[in-house]
Image (cartoon, grey):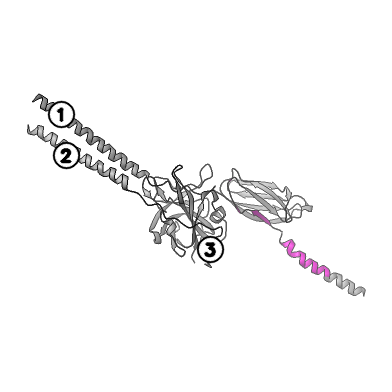
Amino acid sequence: MPTGDRVPRTAVALIALAGVAGGGLLTLGATRTHPPPPRAAPGTNTDPAEGSGTAPGTPLPHATPAQITIPAIHVHADLVPVGASATGELEVPPPDRPTVAGWYRLGVSPGEAGNAVIVGHVDSRETGPAVFYALSRLQPGDRIHVTRSDARTATFTVDGIGSYPKTRFPTDLVYGAGTAPRLRLITCGGRFDEHTRSYLDNVVVFATLLP
Amino acid sequence: MKTQSILGSAALGVGLGTLLLPAAALADTTVSPATTPVGGTVVLTSTCNPKSGDALFHVTGPDRDQNVRSTTAAAGGGLSAELFTAGFTLGTYTVTATCGDGTSSGSATFTVTPIGGAPAGTGTDADNHGLLAAGGTLIGAATTGALLLVRRRRHAATHA
């Protein structure tokens, strides 16, 4: 009889534990929400650097970038090279690695003459806020550091930030082949379309290499 | 009088030459727009004199080495051709132009870029779906277990 009593008590305890845990998870799932990412103001069609008066630093030679650090929004992330999809769309880092950012390897490297492009997720279905979640909070003058495979660190200053509809993406401003060493950071932003499960805008940060 | 006329003509010639020299030196090649999403069209323009024949644009880049012959007289003077970038590898291309008389007309670059923006966000609510699913599973298991226990006790009471 003692054994017979013990088994039901253990079972009752397990059932109660499962019930409590299940109830807790249901409550958490029903109430936990990540706030939407902060929004950036609509972007303009001119490079913010044109009015900043910041003299860019001397261009560096080509070197693969390894990490990006943005102290103002507590970003410190590894960089992986990305290219373009078969349809010609800019690749992004794998969705299962939302904490890394992607360097557009078909363009110049950060610090080289021209516009280097780094893209990162704003959020992820699986893990919530991602590497560039707070990108819209950057302000002109904030610093961006990119460590490179040649052991140099290219430091950029933010010239401006803007939000652009994906249907009117500012290709010239982002990829333009100028001679000054500049950096463009890209993520998603604006209104979220539940139907397509995607954001309607891209947020672009414009930055210039510091001397 | 004759000497003055000769001097005047010479001065006029030097003046005209001075004015025309920069124009000749400005013979150049441009590409518009300087960046285009892959599949877009760029216009190659050279300041070559159309009277000397077609200009030849030599396009080189990541996966390309091709010649494009001018097809039209450019609106502002010179010669131009359209270049369709479908199938181009993304990257930067260099265009050098040679005029019909064989003279070089300089060079320019253009960049073929990805199309549109970046799909860099998928929303965040799906993680809650996982929590709800796990919670529901546990509640279901607890309910099933409770029912089994109740049945077992009833069964035991009936046979006691």
Q: Chain of mark 2?
A: A
Q: Is residue A155 left or right of residue B36?
A: left
Q: Alpha-carbon neighbours of circle 3 within 10 Å: few (<14), some, or many (≥20)?
A: some
Provide residue B137's location: percent of width, then percent of height.
28, 37
Q: Are marks 3 and 2 in contact (CB under 8 Å)?
A: no
- The three-letter code of the residue at mark 1 reads Arg
Which span is picked out in magenta?
Answer: B12-40
Between B104 and B129, the one lying in front of the other is B129
Q: Are marks 3 and 2 on the same chain?
A: yes
Tag 2 or tag 3, which sits nearer the N-term? 2
Residue that badge 3 annotates: A49
The structure residue drawn at horizontal position 28% and vertical position 38%, both measured from the top left corner, is B136
Numbered mark located on residue B152 in the image: 1
Image position of B46 (left or right of A25)? right
Front position among marks 3 and 1: 1
Is label 2 in a helix, a strand or a loop?
A: helix
> Marks 1 and 2, how far apart in space?
16 Å
Observer-side mark, 1 or 2, equals: 1
Q: Quarter of the image holding residue A13?
A: top left
Q: Which residue is mark 2?
A: A13
- Above or below residue B13? Residue A171 is above
Q: Amino acid at mark 3?
A: Ala
Report the Cα–Cα distance between label 3 and label 2.
Answer: 66 Å
View extreme (right): residue: B1
Find residue B131 and report its horizontal and vertical position in percent. Answer: 31, 43
Q: In this picture, is B2 found above or below A86?
A: below
Residue B112 falls within the magenta-colored stretch? no
Rendered location of residue A109, percent (x, y): 50, 55
Specify the subunit that label 3 lies on.
A
Tell whether position B37 is magenta: yes
Question: Disc 3 and disc 1: Cα gap in Å?
Answer: 77 Å
